[in-house]
Amino acid sequence: MTLGVECYAGYRGEETPRRFSLDERKVEVVEVVGRWQEPGQRYFKVRGDDGAIYVLRQDVISGQWNLTSVEIKAGKKY
C-alpha cells in the first residue's frame, strides 16, 4: 500500500496532516483527534472524511510517513 500525506505547517513549523492517499483513494482529515511524540517519531490520530480513525506516524529524521492503524465504523464499506 502506498501512503502519501499532505501537511500544513503552522507558525511553529510543525507539520499537521490535512489529507492523505492510500494507493488511489484520497482521504481528507476532518479532525486531529490526538497527537504525541516518541523518540524520533511523531504520531497523529485523525478522523477521515470517510468516518474512519487513522493513526499516522512520521519518522522525524527521514520525514517518511506510515499508517499504523485504522478503526472503521461498523457498517461502513471501504
Image: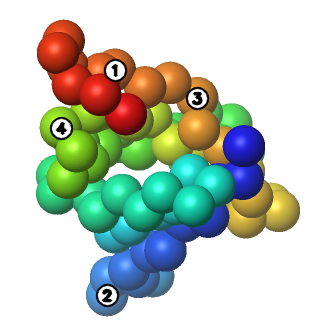
Mark 4 neighbour density, 10 Å: few (under 14) some (14–19) many (20 or more): some
* The one of 72 and 29 positioned closer to us in this rendering: 72
- Which residue is drawn at the image coordinates 36% and 58% (left, top)? 27
Find the residue positioned furthest to the front: 77
Precedes in sequence: disc 2 or disc 1: 2
As shown in the figure, which amino acid type bears the numbered disc 3?
Thr
Does residue 58 appear left or right of residue 48 in this picture? Answer: right
Quarter of the image for the N terminus: give it.
top right
Q: Secondary structure at mark 3?
A: strand
Q: Secondary structure at mark 2?
A: loop
Find the residue positioned furthest to the bottom: 11
**Image position, residue 14 (x, y; %):** 44, 72
Q: Which residue is mark 3?
A: 68
Q: Is residue 40 above or below residue 65?
A: above
Find the residue positioned furthest to the top: 74
**Disc 2 and disc 4 in contact, CB within 8 angstroms:** no
User: How far apart are the two marked residues, 2 and 4, measured between alpha carbons?
Assistant: 28 Å
Precedes in sequence: disc 4 or disc 1: 4
Q: Is residue 21 above or below residue 59?
A: below
Is residue 40 visible in the rendered image? The answer is yes
Q: Which residue is mark 4?
A: 51
**Image position, residue 64 (x, y; %):** 75, 58
Say the numbered circle drawn on residue 71: 1
Precedes in sequence: disc 3 or disc 2: 2
**Disc 1 and disc 3 in contact, CB within 8 angstroms:** no
**Closer to the camera: disc 1 or disc 3?**
1
As shown in the figure, which amino acid type bears the numbered disc 2?
Tyr
Q: Which residue is mark 2?
A: 11
